[in-house]
Image (spheres, coloured by chain):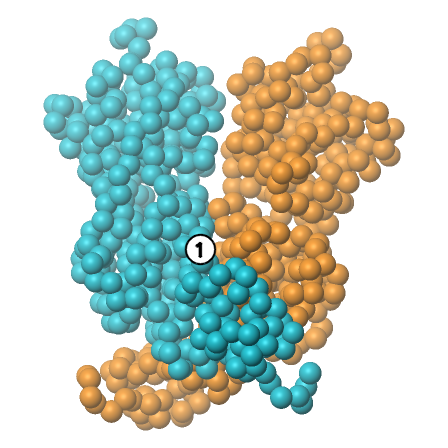
Chain colours: A cyan, B orange
Amino acid sequence: MKGSRVSGIADVARLAGVSKSTASRALSGGGYVSEETRKKVTDAATTLGYVASANAAGLATGRTRTIAVIVPRVNRWYFGSMIEGITRALIPAGYDLTLYVAEPASQDRESMYRFFLARKRFDGVLAVALEPDDDDIEKLIGIGKPTLCVGNGLNGIPTIGIDNIAIGRMITQHLITLGHREIAFLGVTPYDSPRARDVADRCIGYEQAMRQAGLEASMRSTPSTLTVTDGYAAAVPLLADMESRPTAIVAACDEIAIGAIIAARRLGVPVPGQLSVVGVDGHDYAEMFGLTTIVQHPEELGELAARTLLSLIDGDTDVPDRLQLPTRLVVRSSTTAPATSGA
Amino acid sequence: MKGSRVSGIADVARLAGVSKSTASRALSGGGYVSEETRKKVTDAATTLGYVASANAAGLATGRTRTIAVIVPRVNRWYFGSMIEGITRALIPAGYDLTLYVAEPASQDRESMYRFFLARKRFDGVLAVALEPDDDDIEKLIGIGKPTLCVGNGLNGIPTIGIDNIAIGRMITQHLITLGHREIAFLGVTPYDSPRARDVADRCIGYEQAMRQAGLEASMRSTPSTLTVTDGYAAAVPLLADMESRPTAIVAACDEIAIGAIIAARRLGVPVPGQLSVVGVDGHDYAEMFGLTTIVQHPEELGELAARTLLSLIDGDTDVPDRLQLPTRLVVRSSTTAPATSGA
């Protein structure tokens, strides 16, 4: 009630019959407290209308118990899954997640550095899918807080991700082993879109595998952004001409691969009879489309990254510069040997 | 440099040649400052290595310049789009977004109220897609900060959303007008899933339209969660039996509708020749699948909700209890008149 004395943590501890430090731990969500004790303390806090002043607590401890997460987009399967994984690690640790959404090299990215990150209202930063821009590195390091890159990495900042060059090589070799020679890469970044290093690395892997197999002459790549709709739109002209049509497509991600399969069905090109398609991601829709793909787990990647950042904040210096998670090839019905010539 | 005097806002203002209040406005991102002045001030701040102490500023003004956003999921088109829209409104206002991800009635939701929201490290709350649970209302009101519901609303809290009952009626009437009689609703919430009031309301609209047309006897609904994969799995048995197959499907959302179209293609049921399908959302994929649907714009809804909340925080009390956004029916190739009987 207005005018009455404001209850402090000591009052809560007294009513709950626990020490002040236990009451504080129970209310902050940090550190171990039994479920029973936690309930006693929160009931006491509710009874007294006690609310911790987070601002004051922040000034006292120097900790904000907040993590800043930088992502280029939210509304894509990969980023949405990763954010859910991050929150899964932060909730039991009692950490808030502050979300900064900004495309690389955009004006929003600029104001993110200038205003938002400069306020330093967080104990650490998870930078998801950064593009290697010297300016970004300098600004991130300049913040002076523990920072971890997820997906793409920057030299000088620890990074958790996957080996995209090896992945591009592996899926291309899968098609070559099946007997394909006319293999197109679908999904290089269009000139007017923000750079995407993971895609560029997958394309490098494709080119390495093609060269190794002596297929350099039939290498070709088609631009598309990383969505089903753009994959569909890019696949239609690629598949429409029977003469020049490839027998297999390496897609930069599953969304593009699914767009290509939908385009093939529309054009009456049987998959995999006349066209094999392979993707990268392990998207929720992959199984429904029978898509052969490299499975990665962005949700688990986000969870692991958040846990690792929390240990960096706690002063653990045993975090490797570059941590690469394993991935695996799941073969489904979208890939098979090419139809014999003239069929 | 370590050991040197820490620069204050007065130093920044002096170097930039502006008043302290202008320097403060330019650095906080709040209030109008010309681009030229902003640049002078931020350059001066960079030169001096000045960083505002957000914690101290928060104690002084009582404002955290942070919005709390509560969502059940991130990794779905609707929620991802909405979050992107919210950030679009918050960035120019200089507000941080703290994200709380918790399914209704989950343990995470419980700790969200107990610990995270109790810290009150925000000036207002956007509660997205809440389910009408008395407990939630009491807890949200108990926080004592400006709060706005988006999508589903709770009595006693202003809400921005769409009229889901009217939408369910409209899409069902569209099919009835085309001549359909055997119309199934696909996507009622399964018993083991969190409740979803928007879906329940759309189903009420479906039932109203069916009753009005004297089609009560052929009303039927099939459970599915709101994903393409579950829509697909639920549609397969519904479409497999030629005898009992409906001539049209009202899907609870576009993702389910797309799953049903994919299932129909797999089973060799031509859409719309033998099956009309209508959805709700205006999903990015709707056009690619030729889907007739009700278009809503979650990104714009999120942006408008955030702007409205900011005006609530600034003391504007002219916010209506219930603000319903217009939606429109976009007719594409997935709906047509039913095949004449026996065809």
Measured as percent of width and height from the top left, residue B36 is found at 36, 79
Vertical placement of residue B234 versus A4, above or below: above
* Circle 1 crowding by C-alpha within 10 Å: few under 14, some 14–19, many from 20: many
Q: Is residue B55 left or right of residue B251?
A: left
Q: Residue at x 33, y 61 (%)?
A: A310
- Residue type at numbered disc 1: Thr
Q: Residue at x 70, y 25 (%)?
A: B248
Vertical placement of residue A243 versus B318, above or below: above
Which residue occupies the foreground of this view, A279 or A84? Answer: A84
Count of numbered marks: 1
Q: Is residue B341 left or right of residue A231?
A: right
Question: Which quarter of the image is occupied by the N terminus of chain B?
Answer: bottom left
Disc 1 is placed on an element classified as helix
Q: Residue at x 28, y 59 (%)?
A: A148
Residue receiving disc 1? A87
Question: Which quarter of the image is occupied by the C terminus of chain B?
Answer: top right
